[in-house]
Structures are given as structure tokens and as C-alpha cells.
Image (cartoon, coloured by chain):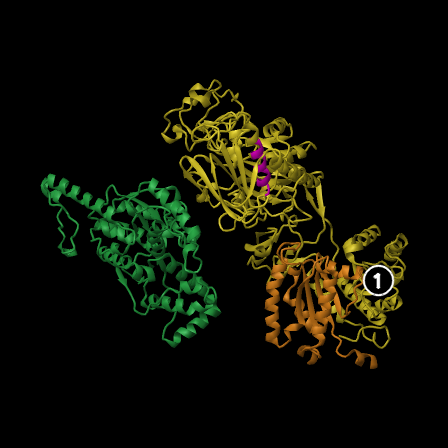
Amino acid sequence: MRKIGVFVCHCGTNIADMVDVEKVVAASGRIPEVRYAVDYQFTCSAPGQDQIKDAIREHNLDGVVVAACSPRMHETTFRNAVGSAGMNPYLVEMANIREHDSWVASDRDEATRKAIDLVRMKVKKVAKLEPLEEIVLPVTRRALVIGGGVAGIQAALDIANTGVEVVLVEKTPSIGGHMAQYDKTFPTLDCASCILTPRMVEAAIHPKITIHTFSEVVESSGFVGAYEVKIRKKARSVDLVKCTGCADCLEKCPVKVPSEFEAGLAERGAIYRPFPQAVPNVPVIDREHCTYFLKDGKCGICQKVCPTDAIDFTVEDEIVTEKVGAIVVATGFHFYDAANYTEYGYGRYPDVISWLQFERLTNASGPTSGKLVRPSNGEAPQTIVFIHCVGSRDPSKGFPYCSRVCCMATAKHAVIARSKLPDAEIFSFYIDIRAAGKGYEEFVRRAIEQEDIEFIKGRPARVIEKNGKLVVRSEDAFSGRPIEVEADLVVLTNGAQAQDEAPELAQTLGIGYDQYGFFSELHPKLRPVETNKAGVFLAGMCQGPKDIPESVSQASAAAAKALEILSKDELSREPQVAEVNPFRCTGCMDCMEVCFYTAIEEDEFMRRKVAKVNPGVCQGCGACVAACMDGALEMKIFNDEQIYAEITGLFAIPKGARKAGGGESAHG
Amino acid sequence: MGKEKDRGYDPVIVGLLCNWCTYAGADLAGTTRIKHPQNMRAIRIPCSGRVSPHFLFTSLFQGADGVFIGGCHPADCHYTSGNYYARRRFALMKSLLDFVGIEPDRLRLEWVSASEGDRFAEVVTEFTEGVKALERPHSLKRDGLES
Amino acid sequence: MPRPEVMARIPVDDEYFLFRSCVASNKYPGMESSTKEVFERIGVGLRESDDQTCCAGFITFTSVAEVTATMPAVARNLSIPDQAGLNTVTMCNGCYTFLTEFGHFLQHNPPIMGKVNEMLSMVGREYTGESQVLHMIDVLPKLQDRIAEQIVRPLKGIRFATHYGCHYLYGFKKDAIDDPFTPTVVEDLIEVAGGTPVDYPEARTCCGSGLTQVVIHKEDLSLPHMKAKFDSLKEADVDAIVVVCPYCLTILDRGQAKMVDRGIAQHEVPVLYITQLLGLAMGMDPVKLGLGANVTSAKKFLDKLERLDRSRATAQAARGGVPRSPQSPASSPSGETTGDGGEAANA
């Protein structure tokens, strides 16, 4: 039988005023398992803790119940205390006779009876506890960052600058993301590439960063501290080492397809680099359009002109395996397809353009060298209309959420347009202006008051082409009248949308995602960059719409959280985890269904399928234990028999206790 | 004896409170000194999703008059979905109680967050009153079931 | 472009239940007669029922009764095709809307459905919701090949504008046969009939009925609105406008006369229902198609059609063939020449 000590705290008068502490001590002493029971003024104080330590040594205790405040307050204190006295720290329980009793009761007898019950319940539980050790997990001190946009680059640099190795995986041929396409950033109108490209280069030359571009994560296994990730490096067809970036091949390619980077406003070849500052500055062959691949080896001009023999048509996709301890997901977003709004004529009328097309049209490195013109005829527009919320805040057609950045982006676009065309008439149709951010509201005021942009509250019904003009029909919500603007250029500010592949990646990594495909943070307030999967963190738009400063801050936060793991060789954690008893397990795998953390996997035991809990991944919620119909799942600290002990303990009043007038309850 | 009579039917209630929300809510009720009936004896569990129907029946067989399960509000579960499992099991446990002839009102599931000390006191009071209103122990206890 | 996923779920049956409409069957009966004639030609049966009543839409949108009060009437109408085991074709956007939406409402509100069926059981009926409600322009594209076979008088060189009306394509979003802003189903049918579909800037502008109805009657708003539409039609130089909703037809047809009357504009564009257009191309007599009921004269358009017939006849004669002439009111549909004149000449 366990030899348990009970230590009843007065907490000054907090407990003692309402609970007859002496009676509690006396009643505790009558419980068979209890070897020693004593009270003290402040059990959490140093002398109070010493009292416990001394008693452990003196009475050879192997279990302790501290009847005091909430375990949420002092459980760790007392675990450490008994630990230092040589007892296993997981053999301590606290009976909460302060918050749950003395502070909320109105009757001293009643409070005393309750305290006695609570102590007895805990004594019975402690009798069933087993000594445990902290779980120690080795850590692979490397990080994986998925997504090479501004958030991914930031996270990679922050981690790498502490000396930890980083593997950065980017889907497209170059890192940089959407920010590389932008002209300027709000509200300061900094040139986007002027602030981004140095960071891209920094990442590229960083000795601790390995970049895999044109690559995708295809498989992930393992758990916090020890992930093994398989990455598909798509066949680039151009050797990253041999290529000098001379670009001779680009000019000679006979194929012309719309350039993704230029948002369809310019063409690229089948061999291309997205943009001149691409990192790495090595072209890639788009095999879907390349004549060599479409016509069985005819063409091959690029190979002939390449001075360094860098082009190789025979290269195939390659799978590389990286071992990492933590993962930062920063896969970004894509723009909502404005063509879904057929009423605005995007895709039908060449002068109805998207956000990204506007960025490219005003960008000095864009297809018009920064001249803002109508795509239809190359002339400067006299009247420009911006339409907000295309695809956002529209449950009937697009998405119900606000994309957050578009109000500011549109104000920025309007101000840029004004600087290029001082005499143009510029209108901006909005539902509401959402300009919460440092300097944001001021920027919008500037657009309205100083830049003479006409902001009209109203959601345009449609855009029709009439006599060479684009007629924008809307309501003016303030005057309550219909309004028509004859425009030369209409810019649709299309909102942000989760990446199409996001759910697939979420499933690969075992993290959650919402109905739109944005990845789910562990807690919306307190754990905004963590995921349900320990060691996987989120940064940037992939978690939800946010602007560049927010994405960058979240990236740094994700890096800090990743480093919390990667700064140590080993991870230790509470042993409150589930465990499968393979003898009882029938392999139904119901437990796997309820496990939110994908901590349960199939295993084989005596040539049978059984479940197995990965203690590195398990978070100790116990959902699987309750779901197991065979009683095969056990749980540390909160096992069935430990909880039963607590329940039955409530009613297990020692014989003769009532007669002895110990104040025990009459139930049972 | 006289004292016992005064109390009338004084039920014993087993509380199964999730560590992250309701247990903390109960702590807050204490910290803010909100007095409420003291019939409940709380057991701390990691999550309401940990609650097995066995806990309910063990409690009732042992002599409890009511069982209170406390979890995090929907969408607030520390483990994301444990409270949803609890909610589904709760529906089954309710009908099971009815089936075996125990008043389903002896079981209650409530969402109480860590910031809702007042609400904790409120729902516990309500539940205690509800069980008291049944006026006598449930059939299993009346028939003198041995623990 | 018709949506493939919607096209895929539209059934092609040997027989449909024809849901008659107050406007298409009474005010402008040519819509109903042309529909029946066209379906007969292409060998698809249409069954009617004397038990059918008004779709009950009016009761709802004039707000004279609660929405739930119209449910038994709607369910009763829907029970007719249900019990006959037929899918329904409606000629009108309004009938389509009310039958579809109220059917949906009933199916998603079991208590009301139960009550409604309790009432129906008193008259020996039951609404199950098993049969589908379809719009005329859901069904016609599926029968396009059979229609093409029956075209004997291709409307070559005639310029047709379209007007789809708001209550089908806009209201049913992704469930409608086509996108409300870039639809082509009617254009496709015009092409099948040999005509030339013409786009015009105000194609998606509403007919104005929302503002001219009995209850609202805001002519000062609706007529300028309509004028913009017809000005745009005039610029596009169209011979006729094709609609798929009897209500739009009424408004666009009578509205022109009203604009003339109020001295707002002078327009004369005949308005045809889709089956009237197909009927013409199948060689039916304009009189039988009921074009005479139109307030806006179709004379100019019909003259152009006749000129077309004559030049076609001349061309055929020049090639020595027997013209496959449109049937005259005297001749019966079966009296048509079956042989191809051109082929005979070549032989």
C-alpha cells in the first residue's frame, strides 16, 4: 500500500477561516493509505515545502496530497518540492480546498465536509498514480520553411541568423512571391522590389540557407523535433550550377505564352525566368509549352545557343529528403479570379484589369516601363475607375470575408495613378473603407483630400462597353441615386484567396484548415502562429488575409516559436500522454479518427494490426481513451482507474468515521 | 439528525471539469468569491472529450445524485474538438439514463470559459437546484446498490 | 456558355408537363401555341392539365398574402406532374421561379410540407417533389439537334438581339443554365435557326417591369430606363428581339407603344418569344404563331423575312431545284416536300 502524506494549508486565513483545518487533518489521518497528515500556515512557502520534504524522508512517503489552492496555481511548485526530496514528482496531487471550497462556501461545517471529501478523493487517486519520467525527444536542429514569399524569406533569415540551418522550399522558379510583382507598398510608397530584392539575395547567399525553388513538399512524417520531409524538385531542365544567367536562351525561344509574372500583360518563352531579378537567376523550361517536349525533340534552340551547356532536356523530377525539427508554413495566397464577376467584363473588355495587372502597368520594370496606359490601345486613360471588394465580402459570389489589404491597395493604386496622370479623373467605388493600421487612415485621407480621388460609396452593378468607353453603373449610397461613370480604364481590386493546394498541403503536414482553405492557428488569440501539429508554425497570408508588415511580423514570430524548439538538443515534456495496451487493442482505429493531432498510427503487434500513440505528438487530451471500446488506451495521470479512484474515493468513507465525529459527509 | 432533516434532500454531485476552461472558471468563481451551493465535488480532467460514459455510471452507482460535465465553449476547445465529442456522448448518455430509468436531469453538460466565474456559479446553482427538485435519490441509489 | 454541370442534370424526356402561364397562354397566346407546335415538330410530347392553376406568384409578390398561404396552391400544381410522373417545362421566368423556390422551401421545411400534404390529401393529391421543374431554355438546348433537323427556313441575315430577363439567370445563380452576364443559350438557338445573334451594350438591362407593375407604377423611372435599352438596340441595328419570359415580352412590346404615346422615343422592334422564333425558322405561319397579338408591329421584320424567302426561292430555282418552301396557311405540316431539290438537280 502507498504511504501517503497529506499536507493541509491554512493559506493564512483564506482557508482556515472557512474550513476547520484540524478536522481535515484528523479525517485524513483515518484514511488507510495516509501515513502522515499535518497542517501549516502557508504550505507553499519555503518552510511549508520543507515540511513536505522532511516528511517524505522521515516517513518514507511515496505519495503526497497537498490540500491548498488550485493545482493550476501551485502544482509545479509541489512537484518540484517532492522531486528535490527524492520522490517522483508525478506522485503529487493537490486538493483544491481554497478556490473550490473556502472561497465559495457560506457554511463552515459544509466547507469542512467538502474539504475532507476532496482530500480523500485525491488520496485515492494518488494511491493509483505511478511514477513517471518526463518525455525526452531528440531535436534535429534544422528548420524547413515552405514558401519563398516575403514571409517565408523573413522566417528563413530570422532562423538562419541564429546559426540554425534552414531549408527553404518554393513552388515557383524564383523566390520573392507576390511582393516581387508589386510596384510600391502602402502607406509609404516604398518601391516594393527595392526593399524585397536585397532580402532575396541575402537569403540566397546565406551560408545556413538551402533554397529549393521549383519544388514542392510531397510527404511529411515524424513529429516535433524530428520531421522527415520529402520534397519534389521539379525538373528545371537548366543546370543551376552551370547556368551563368546570361539569358541568351530566353531571346531565342520561339514559343510565346502569357507571362504569369506580368499577369498576362506580356509574353514569355517556354524557357523563361519569371523576372530579371529572379533568385536563383536561372531559367526554367516550361515543359507544357516547350516545342522540344511537345514535338518529340524538334527545336532545342536554347540548348544550341547556351554557351555553358547548362540545358539538359533529360532531367527528371527528383525527390529529396530533408530532416528537420520544425516547419514554418508560409505558402501565401492567390488573387481571386476577377473573371468570375462576369458583370464587370474582366477577360472580355481589355481595359478592365485586375489588381496585379495594375501593379505591372505602373511598375517601372513592367511591360510598359511604368507607363499607365489602356491595354486596348496604349493610350493614357482620362478616367479611371477602381472597384473594391471583387470577390471579398460577397457571400453570394465570392467569399464572405474581408481581404483586409484591398482598401489600402486601392488607395495606393489611386495615388500612383494620380502621380502619373495629374489630369485624369479617378473614382474609387467602395463598400466601406477599412484602413486600420499605422498611417493607413491618413493615407486614405490624403488620397481623398490632396490627390483628388473621388471615393464613392457603392458597389457597381456592372460595367458595359459603349462607344469605346467602359460605362460603370453603380449606386451612390450617400445620395441614394444611380450613378454612371464613363471610364477608360477599370481596375478591379480582387481579393485574396487561399492557395488551391492548401488543403492538400494541410493534409500532408497534418495541420488544420478552415472552410476557405486558410490554415488554422492553434488559438486565435494566444497561439496565433502555432498549429495543432507541434513544431509546425504559420506565417503570412496562408493563415488568412494580412498585409506585408503583418506577414513579416508573423514570420518573425513563427521563427521565434521554431527556435524555441531548435535551440535545444532535446525536448522534454510532461508525460501526460496516451498509451496503447497492444494486448487489448483490436485495431479498430477509432482512436485514430478522434485524434486531432494525428498522434495515432497503425502498428503491428503479434502479427495483428494495433494502434500506437506517438508520445512526441500526443497532447494528452484523452479523446482517444474515451473513444476506445476495448479499454486498450491508457493515459498517464488521467487514466480511467485513477479517475475511478477519485470518484469512488468520494464515497469511500472510512468505517467508523461518522461515529468518531470527524465531520465526514453522511453520503455513501 | 435534526440537522440532516433541515437540509432535506442534499444531493452529492460529481463534477468532471476540463482543465482549460471550466476548471479554471471554477477557480475564478473562487477568486472572485462568488458563493454558490457546495454539493459538487470537482474532478479535474484534461478535456471534456476525456469523459467516458463509465464515469457517469460509476458516479451514479457509487451514490452520486448528479453528474456535471464542464467543457470549453464550442470552437474554444484547447484540443480543438474534444468538446464536440463530449457533446455527442452527452446526447447518448442522456438517452441512456432515460432508458435505465434514471432522470436525465441528473446529468448536465455546460460550456464555461476560464473567464466565466459568475457563469460557473450560476450553472452549478441551477443544476444543484434542479437535482434537489427531484426530491429523492435516483432509483439505483434507492434500491440500495452496494458500492 | 451553358454550364456543363447544369446541362448534365437536365433530363431529355419523351414527354414533359407543360406548365401554362397567364401571359403566355392568354395575353399573348402565340407563345403557348408556338411552343406546342415546335415540340410537336421535334417529336416531344407536352401534356397539359385542366387542373393546373396560376403559379401563385402574383399572390406573393403583390404581398396580399403570407408566403406560407400560397404553399398549398403551389404544391397542388406541382403534384400534377408529380403524380403523372413527368418533369415540368415552364414558359415563364416567373412560373419557374415560384415553382422552384416554393418547391425547395417545402422540401426543406418538413412541418409545412406535412401540413400542405394534409390539405392536399383532402382533394386526393400528394406533393412528393420527385419531378423536376425546368425552364424552356433548359430544355431547348438539350433538343438542339432535333430542332436543327426541322429548320426549313433559315433566318439568314436577320439580326436578333436577346433579352433573358432577370428572374431566371440572376435569381438561380450557379443553378441556372447559364451565366447571367454572358449567357449564350438563346444566341446558340438563334444560330441554329440560321439567324445572326447581335450583342448590344444594354443587353443585360432589365425590361423595366419591376417599376411598371400595377403596384409600383413609376413610369417616370421605367420609361427612360427602357429608352436606354431601345436606343442601344437601335444602334446595334437589330430586326427583332428574342425573349424567354412572357412578362418581359409584354413590357418590351407594350412599352414601345407607351414611349411613342408619351413622346419619349420612336422605336419599333418586334419582340418574339424563343419558340416563336424557332417556329418561324421551322416554316410556321406568322399568323398561327400569334405575332398579331403584339402591340409593336412586326410588319417590317416579316417583310424582310418574306424577301428572304423570295430570294431563296429564286436561288433554288436558278439551281433547278424545287424550293423547300415554308408552309402556307393552307398546306398541312405533313404536306411538305421531303426530297432535297439540290440533290435532285445533281443526280
Residue beneath disc 1: A6
Magenta-colored segment: predominant secondary structure: helix
Question: Of the residues shown, which amino acid type is indicated by label 1?
Answer: Val
Q: Colour of chain C?
A: green
Image side of residue B44 versus residue A214, left or right:
right
Task: Please check the rendered image and state whether residue A476 is part of the magenta-colored stretch, yes or no.
Answer: no
**Which corner quadrant holds the N terminus of chain A?**
bottom right
Q: Nearer the viewer, residue A125 or C203?
A: C203
- The answer to whether residue A548 of the structure is visible from this angle is no
- Counting from the top left corner in percent of width and height, residue A211 is at 58, 31
**Which corner quadrant holds the C terminus of chain A?**
bottom right
Q: Residue at x 84, y 61 (%)?
A: A5
Query: What is the chain letter for disc 1?
Result: A
Task: Provide the letter of the chain coloured orange.
Answer: B
Read off the magenta span. Answer: A404-416
Image side of residue A660 versus residue A650, left or right:
right
Above or below, A221 against B89 in this view is above
Task: Please check the rendered image and state whether residue A411 is part of the magenta-colored stretch, yes or no.
Answer: yes
Above or below, C281 against C123 in this view is above
Name the element at disc 1. Answer: strand
Task: Provide the letter of the chain coloured yellow.
Answer: A
- Counting from the top left corner in percent of width and height, residue A497 is at 53, 43
Above or below, A660 against A47 in this view is below
- Counting from the top left corner in percent of width and height, residue C156 is at 23, 42
